[in-house]
């Protein structure tokens, strides 16, 4: 089992920056990857970025060049640095982990943190 707790959301003006944190605990040794997703009203949850145990990263086209995912060496925290924020970036941001449970991959989710970008 893996537990995830997001923090760092808030209100920011367009063009500003925020850094989200995802505190990871539990069976960290079972992790394959941790990612960030965004949920906006009326839309499906959207993939933003992911980082694997080999430190390979991937980004959605909508955030490439503006957002950066990183982690500390112990996998205790995964970060999402968000620069040049736009009003369309408003939403609830979720941290998600893929981990092996009984040799099968399972997904774990945090509770989300609200990001609001004003014009």
Image (spheres, rainbow, N blue to C red):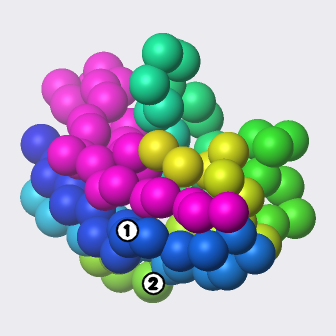
> As drawn, is 67 to the left or to the right of 40?
right
Q: Is residue 94 visible in this depiction of the protein? A: yes
Question: Which residue in the protein does label 1 denote?
Answer: 9
| Image quarter hosting the C terminus | bottom right
Question: Image height check: is 41 above or below 99?
Answer: above
Q: Earlier in the sequence, mark 2 or mark 1?
A: 1
Q: CA distance from mark 2 to mark 1?
A: 23 Å
Tell me what residue is drawn at x 58 percent, y 30 percent.
Answer: 46
Q: Which residue is mark 2?
A: 73
Residue 19 at x, y = what percent? Answer: 51, 78
The stretch in magenta equals: 92-119
Dividing the picture into quadrants, the one containing residue 60 is top right
Q: Main secondary structure of the magenta part?
A: strand
Residue drawn at (75%, 75%) of the image: 15
Residue at disc 2, secondary structure: loop
On whether residue 100 falls in the magenta region, the answer is yes
- What residue is rendered at 47% in x and 58% in y? 116
Q: Position of residue 103 (x, y in %)?
A: 28, 26
């Amino acid at each position: 089992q893996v537990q995830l707790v997001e923090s760092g959301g808030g209100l920011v003006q367009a063009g500003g920056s925020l850094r989200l944190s995802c505190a990871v605990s539990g069976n960290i040794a079972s992790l394959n990857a941790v990612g960030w997703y965004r949920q906006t009203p009326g839309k499906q949850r959207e993939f933003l970025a992911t980082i694997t145990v080999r430190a390979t990263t991937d980004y959605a086209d909508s955030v490439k060049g503006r957002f950066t995912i990183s982690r500390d060496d112990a996998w205790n925290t995964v970060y999402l640095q968000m620069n040049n924020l736009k009003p369309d970036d408003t939403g609830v941001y979720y941290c998600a982990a893929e981990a092996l449970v009984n040799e099968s991959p399972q997904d774990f989710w945090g509770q989300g943190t609200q990001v609001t970008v004003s014009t």
